Amino acid sequence: MKSPKFGIVVFPGSNCDHDTYYVLRKVLNLNAVFLWHKQTSLENCDVIILPGGFSYGDYLRTGSIARFSPIMNEVINFANKGGYVLGICNGFQILLEAGLLPGVMIRNESLNFVCKDVHLKIENKESVFTKEINDKKSLKIPIAHGEGNYFADENTLNELEDNNQIVFKYCAKNGSIIKETNPNGSVMNIAGIVNKRGNVLGMMPHPERSSDPVLGKTDGSLIFKALVNNILN
Amino acid sequence: MFKAKVLIKRRKTILDPQGKAVEIGAKHLGLSNIKNTRIDKYIEFNVDTTERKKAEDEVNDYCKKLLANPIMEDYEFSLEEVK
């Protein structure tokens, strides 16, 4: 399969970097490299992934210190030029701290670390990350986080809606978006958003954990495949 | 040199799940009058300059860019000269 080049940034405390690398290289047969957070070259990657984990021990606020790692200046420039960036879980938190996506992440309403499969409704089927995903009622992808309670003020939320920036919402298996399916208290059940331009996606669920058929679920791989197809076309 | 004492407070409009949980503990202790528990951050550090204005600027920068997230937090600080 022809492949864009994926760069997976490794911060101190990242722990989903190898899972992501494994899925891209071994399961999906794509081109992927690790990028150490202290380097300042993105090595001509076409897609940058900020993986899940606990960068800098989650000290101060999740993602707040990683945001100042040397590589982040390049990631911000790359994103501002239209480069594709995907932040997963802690990666999403870093994108918020870096100002590449609007809003903040606060502690789960339940105060529990929640680790389980959830269902996601694709709210924006036109994004480069979701276009071409077949008409499924919902995607089954796991979450694993203590701070996934997305918050933004009313103006920001209106803007997200008006610009079709909300990509994923927590939902029931049949796709209905109800309070009971919200695992963390996130406003409007938001699980993933893109920036206005649509080239930067942040999502709390872990697509890399539901991509290897051995694990009995593969909905996560649909996102990686959609991205690859949409970039190549 | 100055000693900076920074207080970072979460905006009132933003839920503080930690404060809420701690308050449940107060109820369990039988402290029925405790309301609106909020947990904020208090941070101390030294600023190695003799110019107060320079110290203030640097503390402001530190707070705005890293210690506080201006989307959900406000900060205040004091500077005390130390030898």
Image (cartoon, coloured by chain):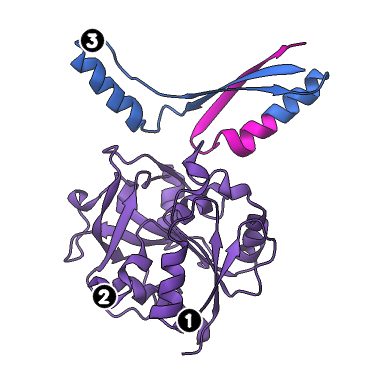
Chain colours: A purple, B blue
Looking at the picture, which amino acid does disc 1 mark?
Answer: Leu
User: Which residue: 21% across, 13% down?
Assistant: B29
Contact between marks 3 and 1 (CB within 8 A): the answer is no
Looking at the picture, which amino acid does disc 3 mark?
Answer: Leu
Is residue A134 shown above or below B61? below
Rounded to the nearest angstrom, the CA distance separating label 2 from label 1 is 18 Å
User: Which residue: 63% across, 39% down?
Assistant: B65
Residue A122 position, x and y percent, is 32, 67
Q: Residues within 10 Å of mark 2 (few under 14, many from 20)?
A: few
Residue B57 position, x and y percent, is 74, 28
Q: Which quadrant of the view contains residue A222?
A: bottom left
**Label 1: which secondary element:** loop
Given residues A215 and A188, the one toward you in this image is A215
Residue under pointer 1: A30
Residue under pointer 2: A214
Q: Is residue B69 magenta?
A: yes
Looking at the picture, which amino acid does disc 2 mark?
Answer: Val
Dot 2 or dot 1: first in sequence order is 1
Q: Which residues are magenta?
A: B60-83
Q: Which mark is residue A2?
A: none
Residue under pointer 3: B31
